[in-house]
């Protein structure tokens, strides 16, 4: 053994490099989107109205559905000919879209699918974090005449730093390891546009029986996750106690 | 003041209702489509009307077909068997491990606990290749054991039990010791019955993991005897010809158990989340 698997990947393997860049692009879009949507949903649902519980359940529900089934659902919703998305788009008078059969759109389909599946899950973490913020802080701010926006920016978000850093790191690692939707919907295509590293590693190991290359890809993926986690933890380091 | 609050609540409700359409509409559409005859699944997909979401003559024929002709029942039974055995073994093994880590002091305890913590931080997908090689060397590839055993080694379950048992006062155990109870009896008759919330959390967690897993079963087994639900669903979508009726109905039938479990035990799903050390 040794490092030849790695040096071959880095020097002579355009398929690997394509996967590498596709994975980074995918990650750079899907992670902020999910964190943002789950945080917004949590902020909207942090009250105790009669409908709060119902909507929490609705948003959290996709978590109970397996990635394989979520992939099935979205491959049909985004089907160019029969899909619900195109029925909706054409009913607005716009042109139908190719979605998973277009190299420009397929990755976005995967991103949409993951936002649908994971947002409710991370929302629960944010809700747990929100519940730990003492009510007295908001009362004090109200006495000082703070607006909702001010309260959110000056109290809620800073005090969610720890939750944020956990969600950021865990969600990033999770999305780097995306496999089932690629396996079920696109098989990495069209023309490699959704060929995420995890799927490339699977194909290498269990389709082409090249365990060395596959292990090298997985190790590189783990290294990327570590690097990202490190910077995300640095970025969200809380410099105060509460 | 009062009317301002009502207005606020109403607009919040409207925003939430619109967002929830994004989550609900695809599900409603899939269920409605699966209830149509196999030949006309997409009859009302376009243009968008109320007929798109409500089948005119609902039928269960697609579901009957996957169970009677495609042996989907076998996949359901396999997944149930694998999940149940994994649950039993995991609860037994990890609660004992959690008990010893919480209540005994022995040499290397901190090291063991650190290893447990590390195992649940390493993502499962990243160990699939070495795990596959190991399972092959043990000659248990393509058996139920290959599906069950990797699920039993669950660091998070050990961690949850350890946290739970740490909060049980040691006086209870000491009193039982004085009365002559063995350690196993204390574990079995006192601590385990007390730890019902932890057990249910672990049961839910392990069930969801096994029932929803695709990657590992795909790799670890290849004969149809051991085909589990997710692999069966994925096999209905092939590149050559996809039978949409089979795909829809197997996806729905395969999702019912976890969704039902979710609706009844939602608070344990959340407990798994808050139990992972996010308080404060």
Image: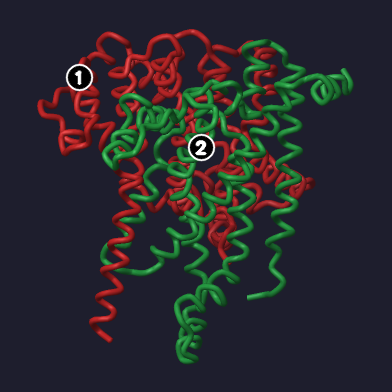
Chain colours: A green, B red
Query: Residue A11's x, y, as percent?
Result: 84, 23
Q: Residue furthest left?
A: B57
The 10 Å Cα crowd at callout 2, few under 14, some 14 to 19, many 20 or more, is some
Q: Is residue B177 visible?
A: no
Q: Which mark is residue B40?
A: 1
Q: Residue at x 23, y 22 (%)?
A: B41
Q: Is residue B7 left or right of residue B78?
A: left
**Compared with residue A236, is residue B180 higher up or lower down, i.e. above or below?**
above
Q: Which mark is residue A131?
A: none
Chain of the residue that carries numbered disc 1 in the rendered image: B
Query: Residue B70's x, y, as percent?
Result: 32, 10
Q: Is residue A138 left or right of residue B76?
A: right
Q: Is residue A168 left or right of residue B133?
A: left
Residue situated in front as seen by the camera: B277 or B177: B277
Query: Residue A3's x, y, as percent?
Result: 88, 23
Q: Residue at x 69, y 68 (%)?
A: A238
**Compared with residue B130, is residue A92 higher up or lower down, i.e. above or below?**
below
Q: CA distance from mark 1 to mark 2?
A: 29 Å
Residue situated in front as seen by the camera: B73 or A177: A177
**Compared with residue B117, is residue A65 higher up or lower down, i.e. above or below?**
above
Locate the N terminus of chain B by quadrant.
bottom left
Locate the C terminus of chain B by quadrant.
bottom right
| Residue placed under numbered mark 2 in the picture | A108
Residue situated in front as seen by the camera: B97 or B179: B97
Q: Residue at x 60, y 38 (%)?
A: A26
**Residue A48 is drawn in which quadrant?**
bottom left
**Compared with residue A3, is residue A175 higher up or lower down, i.e. above or below?**
below
Chain of the residue that carries numbered disc 2 in the rendered image: A
Q: Is residue B67 left or right of residue A67?
A: left
């Amino acid at each position: 053994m040794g490092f030849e698997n790695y040096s071959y990947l880095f020097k002579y393997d355009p398929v690997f490099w394509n996967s590498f860049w596709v994975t980074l692009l995918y990650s750079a879009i899907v992670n902020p989107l999910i964190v943002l949507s789950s945080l917004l949903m949590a902020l909207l649902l942090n009250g105790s109205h009669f409908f709060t519980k119902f909507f929490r359940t609705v948003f959290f529900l996709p978590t109970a559905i397996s990635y394989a089934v979520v992939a099935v659902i979205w491959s049909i919703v985004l089907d160019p000919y029969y899909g619900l998305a195109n029925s909706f788009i054409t009913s607005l008078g716009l042109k139908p879209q190719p979605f998973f059969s277009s190299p420009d759109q397929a990755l976005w389909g995967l991103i949409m699918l993951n936002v649908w599946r994971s947002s409710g899950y991370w929302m629960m973490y944010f809700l747990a974090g929100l519940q730990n913020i003492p009510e007295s802080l908001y009362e004090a701010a109200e006495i000082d005449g703070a607006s909702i926006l001010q309260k959110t920016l000056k109290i809620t978000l800073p005090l969610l730093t720890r939750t944020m850093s956990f969600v950021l790191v865990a969600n990033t690692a999770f999305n780097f390891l995306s496999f089932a939707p690629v396996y079920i919907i696109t098989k990495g295509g069209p023309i490699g546009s959704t060929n995420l590293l995890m799927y490339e590693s699977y194909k290498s190991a269990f389709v082409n029986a090249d365990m060395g290359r596959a292990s090298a890809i997985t190790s590189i993926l783990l290294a990327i996750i570590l690097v990202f986690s490190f910077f995300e933890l640095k970025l969200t380091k809380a410099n105060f106690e509460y | 003041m009062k009317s301002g609050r009502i207005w606020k609540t109403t607009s919040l409700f409207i925003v939430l209702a619109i967002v929830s359409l994004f989550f609900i509409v695809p599900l409603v559409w899939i269920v409605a489509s699966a209830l149509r005859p196999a030949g006309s699944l997409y009859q009302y997909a376009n243009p968008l009307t109320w007929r798109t979401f409500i089948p005119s003559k609902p039928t269960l024929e697609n579901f009957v077909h996957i169970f009677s002709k495609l042996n989907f029942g076998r996949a359901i039974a396999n997944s149930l068997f694998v999940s149940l055995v994994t649950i039993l073994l995991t609860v037994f093994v990890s609660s004992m491990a959690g008990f010893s880590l919480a209540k005994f002091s022995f040499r290397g305890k901190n090291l063991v606990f650190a290893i447990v913590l590390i195992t649940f931080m390493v993502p499962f997908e990243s160990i699939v290749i070495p795990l596959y090689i190991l399972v092959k060397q043990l000659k248990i590839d393509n058996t139920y054991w290959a599906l069950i055993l990797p699920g039993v080694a669950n660091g998070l379950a050990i961690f949850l039990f350890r946290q739970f048992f740490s909060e049980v006062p040691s006086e209870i155990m000491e009193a039982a010791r004085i009365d002559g109870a063995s350690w196993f009896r204390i574990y079995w008759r006192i601590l385990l019955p007390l730890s019902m919330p932890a057990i249910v959390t672990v049961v839910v967690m392990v069930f969801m993991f096994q029932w929803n897993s695709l990657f590992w079963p795909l790799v670890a087994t290849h004969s149809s005897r051991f085909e589990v639900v997710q692999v069966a669903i994925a096999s209905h979508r092939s590149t050559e010809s996809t039978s949409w009726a089979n795909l829809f109905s197997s996806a729905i039938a395969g999702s019912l158990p976890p969704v039902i479990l979710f609706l009844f035990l939602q608070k344990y799903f959340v407990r798994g989340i808050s139990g992972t050390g996010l308080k404060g």
